[in-house]
Structures are given as structure tokens and as C-alpha cells.
Image (tube, grey):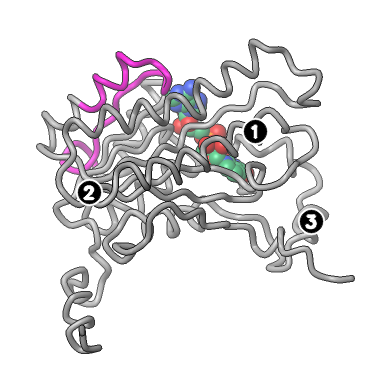
Amino acid sequence: MTSDSERARGMAFDLVDGTLRRFDGRVAIITGASRGIGLAVAQRLVAEGGRVCVTGRRADALEAAVGGLGGPDVALGVAGAADDTEHQDAAISAAMDRFGRLDVLVNNTGINPAFGSLFEAEAAAIRKIFEVNVLAALSWVRKASAVWASDAAVVNVASVAGLRPAEGIGAYGSSKAALIQLTRQLATELAPDVRVNAVAPAVVRTRFATPLFDGREDRVAAGYPLGRLGLPEDVAAAVAFLASRDAAWITGQVLTLDGGRTLGGGV
Ligand SMILES: NC(=O)c1ccc[n+]([C@@H]2O[C@H](COP(=O)([O-])OP(=O)(O)OC[C@H]3O[C@@H](n4cnc5c(N)ncnc54)[C@H](OP(=O)(O)O)[C@@H]3O)[C@@H](O)[C@H]2O)c1
């Protein structure tokens, strides 16, 4: 049996001068990371010693992100659409060429071009949502699996909209529910070599979520027991935990990040 002191020694490898360094020597690909949640995840992993490959469609935005992350020694940007398989190959090759290994994949890209009723949504829009939010995530995992280091981790960025119905974002929510099930299924299929987990945030202050709170943030925040909307850094902290060895015995789980919003207290 492992004693507390042995466990404490085991944890110590991630502390350098009292600072968390859980990603020292590790390399991550984070999709959709030129801003918002993806960029916050990249910042967190770099702050903890990691090197990152960040993706997004706009090359100029990625260039700015890479500069802010600390430049070419720690970050690399590869422009492209997350559901383009040639882009997926290019990003994985570029990360391997630059950094020599791959330990973590964060499937963060998610789109919602179909606000409104699921029942009335255009089939083409629903298809595109599932292509980017679900099928692309699976494809990234498959391609990363060809080059993984041992002890790899995937974190999928889902949504509370994938856990329960939400007005106006039903097609998006259905895709996130599929991403959550994909997380659980891959966790069983890829264990013990790769851990696969997800986070399910409620409203986080980013450009993507602006229509959900713009001009009425106080009112929206009042529905959150913790009294505020999420910040990208809130999500980044949870993603970093799940991607790190601190979560070595966790797989197939969905961590809800919602300031208590979905607790549904009261009578
Ligand atoms: N914000 C929230 O309230 C919230 C809540 C729950 C879940 N989420 C999930 O969190 C993830 C990130 O959202 P966010 O709020 O951080 O969004 P955001 O601030 O708008 O950032 C989106 C990022 O993804 C990139 N991107 C968008 N579409 C892409 C595509 N098709 N291929 C590649 N990159 C793409 C964007 O760059 P380019 O535009 O240059 O491509 C940008 O870097 C999404 O999966 C979203 O569903 C967000």
C-alpha cells in the first residue's frame, strides 16, 4: 500500500521552487487556441513548463498568440480548419518536427452556426456542427495516436449544453452530448495508455459566448450561485488538471464548470 509520504514524494516531481511544473518536458496540441479558452489553456500549460502547438483558422491571430505565449521556443502556430484532415496531419507533423514528442491533445474547437430551434435548423448547418465538434475531435485523437508518447491525455471541451437541453442552442448541445459520449467510449477503448476526459463549461466570457450575455451580464451572472460568469482561466485550470499526472487515475469523466449554475437549488 502506498503511504502518504510516498504519495507526497510522487507528487513532488511536479513542483519546482514551490511552483507547479506539471508539463515540464511535455508537449500539447490545443485546437482553436488563438483566443478565448484555447489560448488560456495554452498559457496555463506553458506557465507550467509545457510546449504547445496552437491551431486556428487565421494565421495572423495565431502569430500574435504564439508571440504572447513566449515565442518559438515554447509555442508553434499551425493555421487551418479543425475539421480539415490535411491540416490535422500538418499540425501533428509540425509539432513533432519542432518539439519531438506529443503528450496532450486538447480538442477545444467548437462552432455553433445555427442559433435557434433544433427542430427547424438546416440539415447542412447541423452536419457542419457535428463535423467540427465531434468527428474532427475523433480524427485528431486517431492521428495523435500514431505519435503519442506513453502516458498521453486527451481533454475534450464540451459544454453544459451537452448535459441538458438549452434554449436556442439545441444543435450545438446535441453535438456536445455526442462529444461527451465519445469521451467515455474512447476512454474505455484507449485505456490504459491514453486517458480521455472532458470539461463541460457553462457561459464563459469569450467572443463565442457574447450573444449569451452581451448587455445583460449582471442578470445572467445572477443565475450563477458563485455570482459571476466563467473566465477562460477557470476552464484552463480544469483542463490542465485533467491533462496532468495529477489526474493519473481519472478517465472517461466530464467535469462540469459552471459556478454552480446547473445545481438547480431551491424549491
Ligand atoms: N465560451 C463559452 O461560454 C463556452 C461554454 C461552453 C463550451 N465552450 C466551448 O469552448 C470552446 C472554445 O470556445 P471559446 O468560447 O474559447 O471561443 P472563442 O473565444 O470564439 O475562440 C475560438 C477559437 O477557435 C478558433 N476556431 C473557431 N472555429 C474554428 C475552426 N473551424 N477550426 C479551427 N479553429 C477554429 C478561433 O480562431 P479562428 O476564428 O481564427 O479560427 C479561436 O482561436 C468551444 O468548443 C466551445 O464550444 C465555450
Residue type at mark 2: give it.
Asp
Q: Secondary structure at mark 3?
A: helix
Q: Which residue is mark 2?
A: 193
Q: Nearer the viewer, mark 1 or mark 2?
A: 2
Q: 20 above or below 31?
A: below
Circle number at residue 174: 1
Residue 60 at what x, y percent from top left? 38, 23
Q: 47 above or below 62?
A: below
Residue at 27% x, 47% y is: 194
Residue 205 at what x, y percent from top left? 61, 47
Q: Secondary structure at mark 1?
A: helix
Residue type at mark 3: give it.
Asp
Label pair 1/2, CB-CB below 8 angstroms: no
Residue at 40% x, 46% y is: 155
Residue 200 at what x, y percent from top left? 56, 49
Residue type at mark 1: give it.
Ser
